[in-house]
Amino acid sequence: MQPFVYNSLPSRVIFGSGTISRLKSEIERARCSRALLLSTPEQADNLARIAEMLGPLCAGTFAGAAMHTPADVTERALQKVRECGADCTVSFGGGSSTGLGKAIALRTDLMQFAVPTTYAGSEVTPIIGETKDGVKVTQRTLKVLPEVVIYDVDFTLTLPPRLTVTSGTNAIAHAVEALYAEDRNPVISLMAEQAIGALGRALPAILAEPHNREARADALYGAWLCGVCLGSVGMALHHKLCHVIGGAFDLPHADTHTVILPYAMAYNAKAAPEADAAVARALGGADGTSALVNLASRLGSPQSLKSLGMPESGIDRAADLAVQNPYWNPRPIERGAVRALIAAAWAGDTPTPLD
Ligand code: NAD
C-alpha cells in the first residue's frame, strides 16, 4: 500500500451549455448584489452582454485584464471596485481574467465567480502569479480560489485553433505532472488520466470541426480536471522549465508548454513508469512519450523552441536557470541531461526516453 494525503479544494462547479443563464441566480444565492465584471479588452463585447443580462446586479465592468496579472492593472481594477461598491467579481475569460479576479480577492476577500473561456484551469486553483517591475511572484493561498465556477461550453466555441491546441496541451501538462508528483494520490491520478484522455480525443475533433459542441464539452471537462490536478499536487521539471524558459526569453506561455511537454515526459518516463503507462493508456500508444509526440503531430503543434523565438545562444543560460532552486522531480535534475533536453527541444529533435 502506498500511503497518501488528499486535500480537496472547495468550489461549486456548474457545467454545461447555456449555463451563463445561471449566473444571476448564483450571485443571488451567494447573497451578493453588486458584481464587478472582469475581462480582457478583446472580450469586452461579451462582458457588455453579460452586464445587460445581470441588470441591476451588475455594478460595473472592467475590461483591462492582461497576461501575468500586472500590478498596475490590479491597482486600476481595485479603484473600480471602490468606485462602484462591488461586493463580488465575475471573471469572464482565460487565465488573465481569472488572475485579475484572484488579485482582487487576495486584497479584498470579495467573492469570486469565474466563467472560463480557455483551458488554462486557473479557475480551480488556489494559485496566483503576479508581475511587478518585470518580476513574477507566485503564491498559493485559498483566499484566491474562486468560490463558484460556471463552465459554459458555448463561450469556448470561438477559441481560435492555435490557442485551442496550445491551451489544451498546457492543460494536459498539468495532468501529466500530477501523475508523477511527489504528493500524487489515487484520486488526483484518476482525474489526471481521465483528463488526458478527454483532451486527447477532443482536440483533434475540434481542429476538424471547431464548433463541435460535444468535442468542446469534452475539452472543457478535461481542462477542469487538469486545473484540479494543478491546484492539488506539486508540479515538477516540466513546469520549472516552462517557467524559466518562458520568462527568460519572453516566449508565449501555452506554446512553451506545448513544445516542452514530450521532452519532459521523455526525461521522466523511466523514473515514473506508472505515470508513463497512464499517459499511454489515456492517449493510446506504446509509451507516454510517443503518445504525446503523436498527439502533437496530429494537432500540428509548435514543436521547437527555435520556432517560438528562443535564440540558440540561450540554451546554456536556460540550463543554468533550470537547475537553480529545482522543483522536486522523479528523476534527479542533472545539468548535462537538462541541457540536452533543452537543446533537443530548441531544435525540435524527436524526444526519446532517457535510461
Ligand atoms: P488569456 O486569458 O491571456 O487569453 C488569451 C487571449 O485569448 C486573450 O486575448 C483573450 O481575450 C482571448 N480569449 C480567451 N478566451 C477566448 C475565446 N473563448 N474565444 C476567443 N478568444 C478568447 O490566456 P490563458 O492561456 O487562458 O491564460 C494565461 C494566463 O493565465 C497566464 O498569465 C498564466 O500565467 C495564467 N495561468 C494561471 C494559472 C493559475 O493557476 N494561477 C493556471 C494557468 C494559467
Image: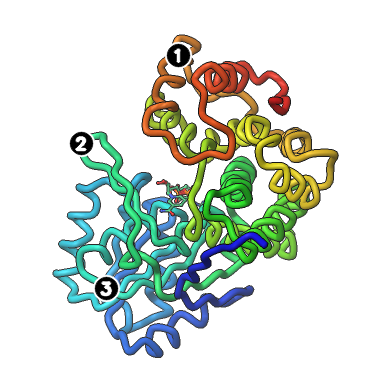
Measuring from the top left, give residue 144's x and y in whole percent: 33, 64
Q: Nearer the viewer, mark 1 or mark 2?
A: 1
**Side (left or right) of 238 relative to 43:** right
Residue at horizontal 53%, vertical 18%? 339
Residue 150 position, x and y percent, is 51, 73
| Labels 2 and 3: the sequence-earlier one | 3
- The location of residue 84, given as percent across then percent down, is 19, 73
| Image quadrant in which you'd find residue 50 | bottom left
Q: Quadrant of residue 17?
A: bottom right
Eyeballing the image, is 202 above or below 67? below
Q: Are marks 1 and 3 in contact (CB under 8 Å)?
A: no
Bin the neighbour count of mark 1 within 10 Å (Cα to Cα): few under 14, some 14-19, many 20 and up: some
The amino acid type found where label 3 is placed reads Leu
| Nearer the camera: disc 1 or disc 3 | 1
**Residue located 56% across and 49% down the image:** 181
Q: Which residue is mark 1?
A: 316
The alpha-carbon separation of the residues under discs 1 and 2 comes to 25 Å
Compared to residue 259, the image places residue 167 above or below, namely below
Instruction: Work out which quarter of the rendered image holds the N terminus and state it.
Output: bottom right
Mark 1 or mark 3: which comes first in sequence?
A: 3
Residue on which the image places disc 2 = 133
Amino acid under label 1? Asp
Quadrant, the C terminus? top right
Of the pair 40 and 274, the residue shown nearer to us: 274
Query: How many residues crowd mark 3 within 10 Å: few (<14), some (14–19), many (20+)?
Result: many
State the mark number for residue 110. 3
Q: Secondary structure at mark 1?
A: helix
Given residues 3 and 7, the one toward you in this image is: 3
